[in-house]
Image: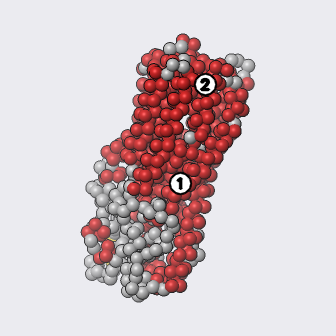
Amino acid sequence: MIMIISRHGRSSSPRAAPPVDARMVSTGSLLRLSASAAVMNAIVPLSLMVQLALLGRRATALQASFGSVVTATSFGSVVFNFLVDGVTAKVGKSVGSRRYREAAGQVRMAFLAALVCGGVAAATLLSLRDPLFSLFRATPEVARHARPYFFVRAAAAPAQCAANAASGCLGGYGRVHAATALSVCRALAEAAAVAAAVALAETDASCFAWIGFAYAACAAANAAAGAALVVTLPPEGSDARLPVMASFSFSRAPSSVSSAAGESAEETELELDAYASGASFAADGASMFARSFLLQGTFFGAMVVASRELGPAGLAAHNVVCQLWMLSSYVVDGFATAGNVCGARLVGEAAGKRIKKRARRANANANENERFDERFDDRSDDEPTSDDETPVCVCRDELRWTCVRVLAFGLTAGLAFLAVFFLFESQLVALFTADEEVASFLRARGVWRTLALAQPLNALVFVYDGLVYAFQDFAYARELMSTGVGYVFLPSLAFVAASARPTTLADIWRCKVALNAWRLALLAARTHGWSLTKRGFACLVRENQNQNRRGRGAEPAQRAPRQAAARGGGDGGGEPDDVAWTAAPAPAARDGADAIDAIGAESPTSHWRQLGSAAREDGDASGDDVEAPLLSRGSPRGH
């Protein structure tokens, strides 16, 4: 919001304040985005659940083999979950702060990381295939079907990681619907292939061979189509695509006068920016890898205990509970994705606002045509502002309101799953198995009750996870998971396995419930006790602002003379930096003698660009002005 701030710090009437973008942050928009993301997240576990049910109708051994292989091989791709949630948060933040070159670089790094991580996962899984089956104590009948299918799923890990990276990039673009369409097409194809194999295959071996071929083909097609969409689609609301396929380029629009020395210095700064961005991507990716590795390890450990203690029928029942647990969690995770997408954009936009203000101040020192009166702008950019109407505070308020709504939506969905599981217990058990021994495990006292009562808890945990990613708080997510697994889950599971009394399926899943209770307590404390407070959000914005400048050898005030020389004294030539370093127009007539615009005519939330004003004409020609920011269009939000 653009305010007129007097020299005494009091605000007068706002001047053409841009309304909040109801398309992105209204309740209806959040619900539509959440619904699309829920379909995207849940369609794969839903497809696996259907496949598991179909195989259970044919033979219990096939069901146990399929569930074991899916859990074990998913470890190789799910541990690299940063390729989805982390990439969505980082690309979304760069797009929100309108650093499009940085966003393109992060897309390239995401796909490169996907290929490397997929190759590592495939090699690791294939080398551990025999030890894993020994660890599971798989019966000969289960192992006979599982070994060839394990090979196919492990070998397809690079394609699966590339598909995950494409989904994350599309989420960062705001193109959640496109990612959802890809996931739906793939899930339908896989489910149809399994149904055909179960119905038409003469032997169990040929059935599993056809299922493995269908999985590999669908994973490769998903990765190829996702990469094509990332390259060809622009971010939501933009008119130009990101230069994803181009190498890091320093070309810019010609200017009437340029300085070779200034251009060389700026190119060096861009190179350093690329290295710093890559280092930040790698560090955050490592944190997310550790977090995902530990989380997936909890499912793996629970499956090992179930396999060793409960036998084939108990393992099949464990896989049914696991698929229902994951289905409900991924449906609710749609609200987390909505919070991640909108939250990351808001965090990036808030960081961009501070960068813009510092940029104008730096240009004012080098450009005599711009008058920026420091006497009336003596607040530090690093200090939390006390004015609740400043653009950064508007972003914080929007983010807080978004968090409240997605948490409420998630809790409502969790309560709905609780009701469904209680009301349709017998129907769901009959849907998954015709084996009375497997059904007896599922109907055992405490198993279904634990599954149902955990749903509201799981819902809140998953939504908070998405919000932590939006805050770029990846290191905290790693530490939270490591302490939860070390202090809560592993001791609980070890106690259950070593207990003198027989281990039950309900005992195993109560260990997961205890872990999620730990996660909920610490995630809620971090979100409401720090990230959404005025001081916490100011620190968050400052950290992201510093990341945007990290790697440069000079501060804005020191770089300004070089930039002014490179563009010929502010004649509108293209700038290499992702911030629009433009000279503001001459000050217009003031309503009051002592009034001054504390934000400036080129504020990121300004809609001068749409109106074709002088600030638009003076904008840079670097190709970065391709998207209006999150809060620049639409009607006021309806609460």
* Rendering coords of residue 442 (x, y %): 54, 18
How far is mark 2 from mark 1, CA to CA? Answer: 35 Å
Q: Residue furthest top?
A: 436
Q: Disc 2 on helix, strand or loop?
A: helix
Seen at 45% across and 85% down, the residue is 258
How many marks the image carries: the answer is 2
Seen at 60% across and 51% down, the residue is 116
* Disc 1 residue crowd, few under 14, some 14–19, many 20+, Cα 10 Å: many
Seen at 60% across and 18% down, the residue is 313
Residue 79: tell me if it is visible: yes
Return the mark for residue 580. Answer: none
Which numbered disc, 2 or 1, marks the residue that appears first in the sequence? Answer: 1
* Disc 2 residue crowd, few under 14, some 14–19, many 20+, Cα 10 Å: many
Seen at 46% across and 51% down, the residue is 227
Q: Is residue 598 left or right of residue 71?
A: left
Q: Image height check: is 120 above or below 388? A: above
Return the mark for residue 145. Answer: 2
**In the image, what residue type sits under mark 1?**
Ala
State the residue in front, 423 or 594. 423
* Rendering coords of residue 566 (x, y %): 46, 83
Colour scheme shown:
secondary structure
Q: Image height check: is 358 above or below 36? A: below
**Looking at the rendering, which quadrant does residue 150 occupy?**
top right
State the residue in front, 259 or 98. 259
* Rendering coords of residue 85 (x, y %): 51, 48
Q: Disc 1 on helix, strand or loop?
A: helix
State the residue in front, 413 or 189. 189
**In the image, what residue type sits under mark 2?**
His
Instruction: Between label 2 and label 1, give the one nearer the viewer.
Output: 2
Identify residue for label 1.
110
- The N terminus lies in which quarter of the figure? bottom left
